[in-house]
Amino acid sequence: MGTTNEPCIICDDIAIQRGDTTIWSHGTFTIPRGTVTAIVGTNGAGKTTLLQAELGLIPLSHGTMTVLGGAPGTTNGRIGYVPQSYTSEIDSSLTAEQSVLLGLTGTRFGFHLVSRAQRSKALEAMEFIGISDKAHLRLSELSGGLRQRVAIAQALVSDPELLMLDEPLANLDLASQRTTVHILRKLNRELGMTIQVVAHDLNMLLPILTGAVYLLDGHPHYARLNEVLDSKLLTHLYGTEVQVVTTPQGDMFVMPGLDDLDPGIRDMHDTRELARSHQHAKHTTTHHTHTQTGR
Ligand SMILES: Nc1ncnc2c1ncn2[C@@H]1O[C@H](COP(=O)(O)OP(=O)(O)OP(=O)(O)O)[C@@H](O)[C@H]1O
C-alpha cells in the first residue's frame, strides 16, 4: 500500500475525443488517496471513458493526467479494475480460484506454473471477500453476486492501491448489493485502498462515499460528498427532479423529486413517512440504505 500523501489522481484540463465527438472536456480536479469516489452522470456522459482514460486505454485529446504518480497506463500494475461486463468476460468453466489467479498470471493457460505463493495470495483475497469456501466451484455454479465477488477478488489479488469498479451494484439483489458495499468499506477502512465506483444509484453507496466525480454539461468535476448531495446540482445532473432528503436522524437519501409525482402518491411518500418507515425498516430488516452526514 502506498504511504505517500500524493493525490491518487491529478487532472489538469483533460478532454477526451472519440471520432469527431468530444465526450467531455475541461476536467481539472484532484482525487485524494484513501477516498471512496462515485463517478456519476447520465447514460453516455462518459463515466466508463474516464476509467479507461485513467488506465491509459484511451488517450487524452487535451491536458494531462497523473495516476498514482505516473502517466495513465504506466501504473496499471497497482490498479485493480472490475469492468461492467465482468460476467461475460470470464470463462464460466473456470473455478473461482482459477479465476482469481488470473489476477496474478494474466492468462488462462499454464495453471501448472502457478506457485504456492500465488495460490496462497489467491486464497487470501478470497478469504478477505468471504468466498474461500467457493474456491473449487466453477463460475457457472455461482450466483451473480458470488461471481461478482470473484471478479473483485481477482482485481484485489495483486494488492492494488486503487480499485476501480464499473457499476458493481447493477443487476445485484439488495443483499448482494449490501455485501458488495460492505466489502468496499472494509477495503477502504482496513487497507486504506482508494476506490472509484461508477454508479447510477447513489443511495446504497452513501454510507461509504467521501466524494464524487460528476459529469455535468460535458465537464468532469470532483467534489466532496456533502457538496454533491445538493438537490439543485443532482436535478441538473440527472436532468430530472431529484431531492436530497435528510431524516430526523441525519441519514440522507437521494430520491426522485416529489413535485413530479401524482399528489396521491406524494401523500403516501412524504418525507416524514419515509423517515418513519426508514426507522421501522432499521429495526425489522437489513434492507435499508442510509448514511450519516459529515463525511
Ligand atoms: N469505442 C467507442 N468509440 C466511439 N465512441 C464510443 C466508444 N465507446 C463509447 N463511446 C461513446 O462515448 C460516450 C461515453 O460512453 P461511456 O460508456 O463512457 O458512457 P457512460 O457514462 O459510462 O455510459 P453508461 O451509463 O450508459 O454506461 C458515449 O456517447 C458512447 O457512445
Image (tube, grey):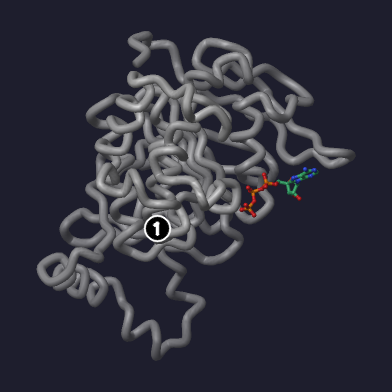
| Tag 1 residue | 142
Rendered view: 37 above or below 270: above
What's the amino acid at mark 1?
Leu
Camera-side residue of 106 and 234: 106
The image quadrant of residue 250 is bottom left
Q: Farthest residue to the front: give it.
A: 112
The image shows residue 9 at horizontal and vertical percentages of 52, 22
User: Are there few (<14), some (14-19), or many (20+) residues within 10 Å of tag 1?
Assistant: some
Determine the residue positioned at 52% across, 52% down: 92
The image shows residue 27 at horizontal and vertical percentages of 64, 29
Camera-side residue of 72 and 213: 72
Camera-side residue of 175 and 211: 175
The image quadrant of residue 16 is top right
Rendered view: 115 above or below 17: above
- Tag 1's secondary structure? loop
Determine the residue positioned at 39% across, 39% down: 97
**Image-based side of 291 in relation to 152, left or right:** left
The C terminus - image quarter: top left
Determine the residue positioned at 80% across, 34% down: 17
State the count of labels: 1
Q: Is ligand 1 less than 8 Å from the beta carbon at label 1?
A: no
